[in-house]
Amino acid sequence: MTKPVRFAIIGLGVVGARHVQTFRKSRSRNFALTAAMEVNPEVARAAKAALPPDVPVYSSMDELVAAKVCDAVLIAVPHCWHPVLTIQAARAGLHVLCEKPLAVTVGPARAMIAECDLNQVALGAMLQDRTSAMNVAMKRMISAGRLGRIHRISQVCTRWYRTQAYYDSGAWRGTWDGEGGGILINQACHALDVFQWLGGMPTSVLASVGTRIHEIEVENTAEALLQYADGAMGHFYVSTAHEPGMDFIEIFGDKGTLVARDGKLRLAKLEAPLSRHIQKCKIAEADIAKIDTAWTDVKLPAKPGGSHAEVIAAFAGHLLGGKPMVATGAEALNELELSNAMYVSAYSSKAATLPVDAREIEKIIARLEKDRSTGKGNQQRKKADTALRKLLKK
């Protein structure tokens, strides 16, 4: 492939419009916006003014493919349609950079990955929190063994405060038949991805979900306890009904602890590993047998990172020279496994094991849609699932 990688944005709504601005502001010679696709004529007309004058807007995937104006697509439509558009693009030989989450449930997401592999096209995910300076620093320290074996990871993320007006602003928002879930399937994708990126994937999840204050069909708050194969434990809590919001991560290891909070990263280094001190220390008195601990502030780069542009640039670098992308489709599946497992646990009143049974989560979401849907979502999820089934039969 020659420079620049030609991208088409699929979907010119709120998120797609942001990606248009990312391309317009970029000075990279490795990628360029050369086309767009939008099925809603009104949205397309409204978005036209923000697009460069030489970027055509097509109304269907067939038109876009036939025009041969792009090498890759950036999918930015409601997530129930991600699998259909990804598979259509893959079969046309187009590489895919998909907004989070890959899909509403793991079955269609696994089909996306398999189809891209079959057609030998790249599948990446827009999980830009992996590029933030804070998260990169934590990942490097953990990978370098600075904390030793991880015993516990905890994350609380309530920075996604949303008003009722937010949920009322789009027909698909906050619905089972449109969005297919609440905070777990929408805002929490980034937090769940970072959570497992740093702490690894658990073997089981025990979760509860709920809705408070907002008048929506789906959950706006979720909490989970997680168990890992090596005995480690995890805790995860998210909500769109908290203010002031916060975001902090605590990772406890055998050699030390990392705490990320309020834009600062601190490291507590133990003078002796916890496992050794527990066995070797001869002091029996409670509150006296302590391990000397040195707290230090971890210096972070001046640039905070965490931008869409970094994900696009890395994806282009992968296509041009085989460099690592920020998150592959297979890696992006992990956060969806976690959110689906939390739904399975919460709505079946049991711990859910991973990987998730695709049939079980489909039954649960279908039941929730039947029992709680008000019809506001216009059955977008059902339409997308029907289109996907037809596509997979071809």
Image: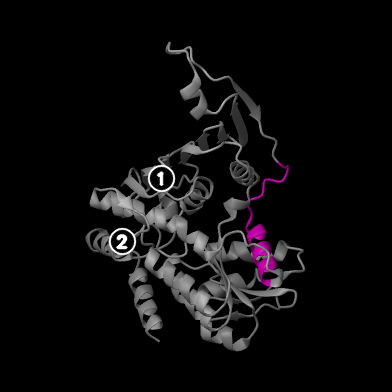
Q: Residue 243's spot in the image, x, y percent? A: 46, 37
Residue carrying label 1: 228
Q: State the SS at label 2.
A: helix
Within the image, what quadrant is residue 370 found in?
A: bottom left
The colouring scheme, among rainbow, by chain, secondary structure or one colour, is: one colour
Q: Is residue 42 left or right of residue 319?
A: left
**Which portion, as a residue range, is magenta?**
301-319
Identified at 62% across, 23% down, the residue is: 294
The reply to whether residue 247 is visible in this rendering is no
The reply to whether residue 63 is visible in this rendering is yes
Contact (CB < 8 A) between labels 2 and 1? no
Identified at 40% across, 82% down, the residue is: 391
Relative vertical location of residue 275 with respect to residue 95 in this rendering, above or below: above
Relative vertical location of residue 292 with respect to residue 328 in this rendering, above or below: above
Q: Is residue 316 left or right of residue 16?
A: right
Relative vertical location of residue 166 with respect to residue 269 in this rendering, above or below: below
Q: Residue furthest left?
A: 371
Quarter the N terminus occupies: bottom right
Task: Depth check: give the residue in front, 106 or 36.
Answer: 106
Q: Amino acid at mark 1?
A: Tyr
Q: Mark on residue 138?
A: none
Quarter the C terminus occupies: bottom left
Q: Main secondary structure of the magenta part?
A: helix
Report if residue 304 lies within the magenta region: yes
Q: Residue 379's spot in the image, x, y percent? A: 33, 70
